[in-house]
């Protein structure tokens, strides 16, 4: 790949500045949001629209910015770096990431015209509902069903660990449309908050990624018009193309959080004095700064490469984005830990940004594909074969 591909255009630099301004506006609230595990999501989404960081990849004909996965990655990175909290990224996730991507790739024009303009304008937020109480990594074993009855779909089942639930109002939900086992019977529907037969519940309290809930969806004979069917059975491989946007999002979020922790360590190192001089004049701290930046640059390269090689500019490829997400989550965790060491005792104190970034990154190591699952995905892509891990 030509090195010039990584150089930002004037338009991209301007987007980065808007994303940075958005993160800076909410940075003073990051500690409170983390402590209370509650964020003013509606207000933050409205700000994201006004400041030009919403609906980044949604086509212009639906009111979006019509940009690529690369621009989305830049915006997530810069906003998280400035706010030093995952919440900045979550707001961008709500109007650009996996839910809108499934709508875009589905080809369902009725649903696209109904939902995408509302999402791009910030009047609607979209989540992805995939995980279930009994199925996390085994995504092709999901049990939530969509049964056809005339011109309606009847949905039954449960979803868990749904970021934004119950605050978000639109849920792109993976369902099983027939009795064929594994991926062959899986498709996706879109369902709105308030639909009869859909119950939304709060989820568990996380150690990181706080502020936006991670709740549960319970479908009990929830009836949807057939127009809410985004993709039918057998579409799982295509749906996962859209899901790869979540992995790019997480890699970009980890990059921004690592940079935010690094910024804090550099500032602290120049201001904090011990033994009569700034601590960044001690070789131990000097080396930590060098190590952190080298790690950050490696994450930046792999993340931006995954964004730049995305199909149609919007759907990252499985191998590239899995490599980026694996490396980002693993490496950003170490960067944040090193930043905490620079701060010494204060590095362990809640309210200091590196500690918060560290917890947010740890959650990102699990969300969107665990480290172990990502390794399986990468190896299967490289070797052209998958491990059969099912019980016999």
Image (spheres, rainbow, N blue to C red):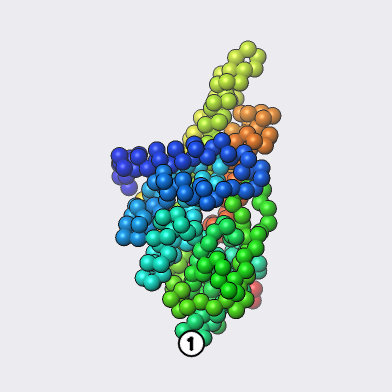
Say if 288 sits above or below 186 in the image. above
- In the picture, the quarter occupied by the C terminus is bottom right
Q: Residue at x 65, y 14 (%)?
A: 275
Q: Residue at x 57, y 48 (%)?
A: 40
Residue 158 figure quarter: bottom right
Where does the image place residue 5, in percent across and percent down from the top left? 32, 44
Q: Is residue 137 left or right of residue 93?
A: right
Q: Name the residue nearer the viewer: 335 or 89.
A: 89
Q: Residue at x 59, y 47 (%)?
A: 39
**Which residue is the site of mark 1?**
150
Where does the image place residue 369, in percent across and percent down from the top left? 55, 58
Where does the image place residue 152, in percent across and percent down from the top left? 49, 82
Q: Name the residue nearer the viewer: 310 or 298.
A: 310
Q: Is residue 180 left or right of residue 349?
A: left
Say if 5 sits above or below 132 in the image. above
Q: Residue at x 45, y 47 (%)?
A: 48
Q: Name the residue nearer the viewer: 34 or 289.
A: 34
């Amino acid at each position: 790949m030509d090195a010039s591909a990584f150089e930002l255009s004037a338009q991209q630099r301007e987007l980065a500045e808007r994303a940075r301004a958005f993160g800076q506006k909410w940075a003073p609230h990051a500690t409170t949001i983390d402590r209370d595990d509650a964020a003013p999501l509606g207000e933050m989404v409205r700000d994201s629209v006004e400041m030009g960081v919403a609906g980044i990849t949604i086509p212009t004909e639906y009111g979006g910015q019509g940009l690529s996965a690369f621009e989305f990655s830049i915006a997530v990175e810069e906003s998280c770096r400035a706010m030093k909290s995952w919440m900045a990224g979550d707001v961008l996730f709500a109007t650009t990431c996996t839910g809108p991507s499934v709508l875009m790739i589905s080809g369902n024009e009725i649903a696209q015209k109904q939902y995408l303009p509302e999402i791009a304008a910030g009047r609607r937020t979209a989540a992805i509902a995939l995980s279930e109480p009994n199925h996390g990594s085994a995504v092709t074993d999901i049990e939530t069903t969509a049964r056809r009855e005339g011109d309606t779909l009847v949905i039954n089942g449960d979803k868990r660990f749904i970021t934004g639930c119950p605050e978000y109002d639109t849920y792109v939900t993976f369902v099983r449309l027939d009795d064929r086992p594994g991926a062959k019977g899986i498709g996706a529907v879109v369902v709105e908050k308030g639909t009869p037969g859909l119950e939304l519940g709060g989820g568990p309290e996380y150690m990181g990624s706080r502020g936006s809930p991670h709740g549960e969806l319970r479908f009990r004979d929830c009836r949807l018009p057939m127009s809410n069917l985004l993709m039918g059975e057998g579409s799982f491989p295509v749906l996962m193309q859209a899901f790869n946007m979540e992995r790019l999002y997480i890699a970009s979020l980890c990059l921004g959080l690592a940079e935010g922790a690094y910024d804090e360590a550099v500032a602290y190192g120049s201001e904090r004095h011990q033994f009569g001089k700034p601590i960044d004049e001690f070789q131990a701290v000097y080396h930590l700064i060098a190590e952190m930046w080298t790690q950050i640059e490696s994450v930046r390269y792999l993340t931006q490469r995954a964004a730049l090689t995305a199909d149609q500019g919007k759907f990252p490829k499985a191998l590239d984005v899995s490599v980026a997400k694996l490396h980002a989550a693993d490496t950003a965790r170490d960067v944040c830990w090193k930043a905490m060491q620079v701060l010494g005792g204060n590095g362990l104190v809640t309210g200091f940004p590196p500690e918060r970034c560290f917890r947010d990154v740890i959650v990102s190591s699990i969300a969107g594909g665990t480290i172990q699952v990502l390794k399986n995905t990468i190896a299967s892509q490289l070797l052209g074969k998958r491990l059969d891990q099912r019980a016999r």
